[in-house]
Amino acid sequence: MSAQPVASIRRKRRMRIAAAFVVLVGLACYLAVQYITGGPGAPQCTVRADGDEKAYELSPEQAANAATISAVASSRGLPERAVTIALATAMQESGLRNIEFGDRDSVGLFQQRPSQDWGSIKQIMDPVYASGEFYRHLAEVPGYSRLPLTVAAQKVQRSGYPQAYAKHEARAALLTGALTGRDGAALTCNESRPADSRPGGAAKVRAQLVREFGPEVLPRTGGTAGRGASGERQLTVPVRQSGPSAAADVPRRGWELATWAVAHSGELHIEQISYAGRTWSAADSGQGWQRRTEGPAAAGRDAVVIVAQ
């Protein structure tokens, strides 16, 4: 065989190997995107402020984690700026996914490290605990609410890429407006339930609500539960605020609780949420928040009504 055909064969072989490598890289990128966004059909949650055409889309898992981060801030009486800083940090560190891997021994939403005294792996993998630890460290930063987001986040995280947090600030602020109730009915999710989630009725919703917002979120009776042939499925959460601005804060608090329920609707098997004349229904989730003139949604702004399977 002459040298020329041998060289030609080798060239073709190298081209086939190169083509196979490109295909593998493309597949890896596709799988990574599917993992971060939640799989085929994702994202399934959308947040949009009133009159704003721009929307931020995320998966149900990401929405639930974001709602937990916001609720923990609420339980500690922290301002919106703290929520925005935390959300932007989690967006950069984990894509708002509670992952069990990372750089060295980093795990969880904020990629906190057991070796750096953030807690045990089991603790850090708990979004409520991880969020609380982030806020505990953030509160120790003097004047954090007035600092640039990258500076505040970096003082907590000690990241090797501190400027990376900045690219998430706009979306984090938009999500903060929805989750804190400032922008009512701004977040909606299509029906999507994790494969390992199980129905728990109103009791499961109540337990998660108290765990994330604190026991003060419900009266001592635990909220009003509706019972009947279908069992305990309905939870009525009073909307209460105190202080000189309480009257103005009630609608915001109501939307904070209602939006939290939408974000957790998949894992908690929530079928319907009603507040201030509007209703979100899992059976008709593609329509978002719809106005209602009768039923529990028409009761006013003094309570959020949640119906769960």
Image: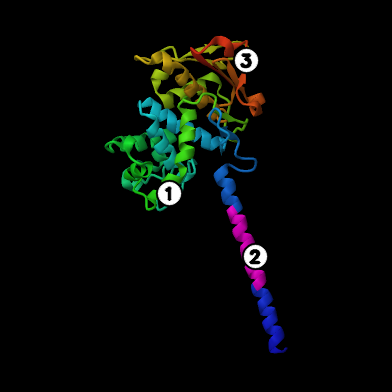
Tag 3: amino acid = Arg
Tag 1: amino acid = Ala
What type of secondary structure mainly makes up the magenta span?
A: helix
Q: CA distance from mark 1 to mark 3?
A: 43 Å
- Asked whether disc 3 touches disc 2, contact meaning CB atoms under 8 Å apart, the reply is no
Q: Locate residue 27, reporting x and y percent.
A: 62, 56
Q: CA distance from mark 1 to mark 2?
A: 33 Å
Mark 3 sits on what residue? 292
N-terminal label among 3 and 2: 2
- Mark 1, residues whose alpha carbon is within 10 Å: few (<14), some, or many (≥20)? some
Residue 269 forms part of the magenta stretch: no
Q: Residue at x 35, y 25 (%)?
A: 77
Q: Does residue 205 appear left or right of residue 146 in this picture?
A: right
N-terminal label among 1 and 2: 2
Q: Which mark is residue 164?
A: 1
Residue 26 forms part of the magenta stretch: yes
Q: Is residue 230 above or below residue 180?
A: above
Work out whether residue 199 or residue 79 is closer to the camera in this orientation and state it.
79
Q: Does residue 62 appear left or right of residue 88 in this picture?
A: right
Range covered by the magenta-colored residues: 15-29
Q: Is residue 115 above or below residue 185?
A: below
Q: Locate residue 111, reporting x and y percent.
A: 41, 45
Residue 72: quarter of image: top left
Q: Which mark is residue 20?
A: 2
Q: Residue at x 70, y 86 (%)?
A: 4
Secondary structure at badge 1 equals helix
Front label number (3 vs 2): 3
Front label number (1 vs 2): 1
